[in-house]
Amino acid sequence: MTKGCRYGTHRVIEPKGTLPQPAHRLDNTMSVYDNEVLIEVSTLNIDSASYTQIKKACGKDPEKMKQMILSIVEERGKMQNPVTGSGGMLIGTVKEIGPSFPSHKLKVGDKIATLVSLSLTPLKIKQIKKLTPESDQVDVEAEAILFESGLFAVLPDDIPEKLALAALDVAGAPAQVDRLVTEGDIVCIIGGGGKSGILCCYQAMQNTGPSGKVIVVEFSKENAQRIIDLNLATDVIVADATNVMDVYNRVMAVTGGRGCDVTVNNVNVPSTEMTSILITKGQGCVYFFSMATSFTKAALGAEGVGKDINLIVGNGYAKGHADLTLNILRESKPVRELFEKLYL
Amino acid sequence: MKKGNKYGVHRVIEPKGVLPQPANKIDNNMDEIYDNEILIDVQTLNIDSASFTQIEHQANGDKAKIAEIMLDIVAKQGKHRNPVTGSGGMLLGTVEKIGDALIGKTDLKVGDKIATLVSLSLTPLRIDKIKDIRSDIDQVDIDGKAILFESGIYAKIPADMPANLALSALDVAGAPAQTAKLVKPGDTVLIIGAGGKSGMLCCYEAKKRAGVTGKVIGLCHSEKSTKRLQDLGFCDYVFSADATQPVSVLEKIEELTGGQMCDVTINNVNITDTEMTSILCTKDTGVVYFFSMATSFTKAALGAEGVGSDVTMIVGNGYTRGHAEITLQLLRESDKLRKVFEELYA
């Protein structure tokens, strides 16, 4: 068995010297190096920005979408959307574990979800079994490789695997909210009605307590109503987050002109950076989870309006994020029921 | 005088509803100003380094062509926002007129020499004539006018240093000021792009904050900048490497830190694909501060997750309270720094 690099650089075909994520092409030969895990994949959970792009490009035609996914993986050896740059995650069963893989808890036959992005995971698809344009979960017959540095979660017995996958896909978001939000904070969740938004709202409500405020800005009326029904926010604003001045005026009205301590951006549409910046108090913090965030728009935007705030790049990984997220589904019956309804 | 919006929304021509920075076109008519604006008689533009590098490249270094590209940008947009890099820069000028609503509220008066500290990417600008292009320091002398909005930040040029020297330092004022906030005593700090303008300021500030128990490592690219930084003596280690090669840089940092890696990494290079290097060289409880305008948001976000690093990644904010004072003070404190800045940028 050949010795592999901790970060999987041994799988990079081109360009040489890069890591698997920025690489154009990976070696997806499905025999393991000494520190890798081979996974028999059952479901791919494509990143929402990526899936939306594929859906648009194929005019919602499932056959064309299948072809597009197959050709991306064929060309790159991984499911990294060339337009959005993003990936997603997968569930599968452990088929083989290299002797140098560091976690001794994992055994062959375990059902796991990988928590690293598909944008760096070597993948080989034999066939796509089921794809519907409405759901970003795609059933496949495929194999994948997990690197030594790769994160994973063994799927729990008490939560159905697809439900767990849907939640784990956005596990970073509520975990970061848990770190950022403290009692009495005014928090705004932009795109609060979506999947990661709901989990963020729940966590934010837990952390701010009765003296704080959780404001949701949501585009879809239906999603907004859901947040109201489940009591996941103190204030809900239905608005287009790209319309800076409209959102700014309405958030200022709700906060008595004070703005927010923490703003979490979860929307997967471009040009919402300024909205996030303007509604945040000086010395406050904006957490950008949206993969549609433009670095320069955020950086120059804050300077342009003279705002001394922390702008943070959303990190999909935070220690303990899988447990925290699965616990939300255990703690909150309404959230679990909603997730079952929407994502199963 | 017409009443203006604090953020300058009244100057946006298209698309409607956005702020001046993301707008494609803003109104640069200076014949009449709004009641909360300040009219500036512009002397020098300090083009953002990523932007100037791109323009210079597109013009093949030809000054007449550089002037043409710049005039074209301003003619189309009413501001100098590079359409490729999205970035701007700043300017030096003299206050010519102050809007009625600001009189008594601002500490500025007509005739004050100021540098605007908001980006040119959102500043209404009219260029009447390009007088001189100083390619080596990204500065362009012009005849022209600009508008500072009510929310716009500025610094008065101090009496104890030449205007161009102050301008070149203020241009990157955010970087050393954020370094001052981030670095704690005892920290191991890596500065990527340490030999450049903001890099040198960051190294000086980082060493000051990290103290004798801390360690400051400077990564430079060219041999010349490496030598210069070594001679300045701010860093504990200086080495030359290609920051786009994560694996080799990682090995070097492992060696220098005894496998501990860095508490704080500050990325100042204006080239693409240095996100992973920054992430891998940082402890997974550490902080990466991205000052480079060439940073890709998705590469950083997915990169950290991909290698299972719990690092905090911050988008460089060019503004933080007191940044102009902190930065100008560095030039007063360190004769070596001031000398290098005078030689290179003034």
Image (cartoon, helix red, strand yellow):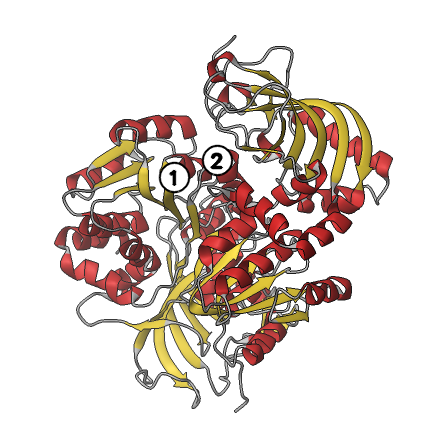
* Residue drawn at 75 percent across, 43 percent down: B346
Question: On the rendered structure, is A113 left or right of B325?
Answer: left
On residue A306, the disc is 2
Q: State whether residue B134 is above or below residue A161.
A: above
- Say if labels 2 and 1 share a chain: yes
* Residue drawn at 29 percent across, 67 percent down: A320
Res A176 seen here = yes
Q: Secondary structure at mark 1?
A: strand
Front in this rendered view, residue A222 or B267: B267
- Characterize the local packing of mark 2: few (<14), some (14-19) or many (20 or more) Cα atoms within 10 angstroms: many
* Extreme-top residue of the structure: B1
- Characterize the local packing of mark 1: few (<14), some (14-19) or many (20 or more) Cα atoms within 10 angstroms: some
The subunit carrying tag 1 is: A
Front in this rendered view, residue A4 or B325: B325
Residue A343 in which image quadrant: bottom left
* Residue B154 locus on image (x, y percent): 56, 32
* Residue B261 locus on image (x, y percent): 50, 73
The amino acid sitting under disc 2 is: Gly
Q: State whether residue A149 is above or below residue A337.
A: below
* Residue B6 locus on image (x, y percent): 46, 23
* Residue drawn at 26 percent across, 32 percent down: A255
Question: On the rendered structure, is A29 left or right of B334?
Answer: left
Q: Secondary structure at mark 2?
A: loop
The number of numbered discs placed on residues in the rendered structure image is 2
The subunit carrying tag 2 is: A
Mark 1 lies on residue: A282
On residue B103, the disc is none
Q: Quadrant of the C terminus of chain A?
A: bottom left
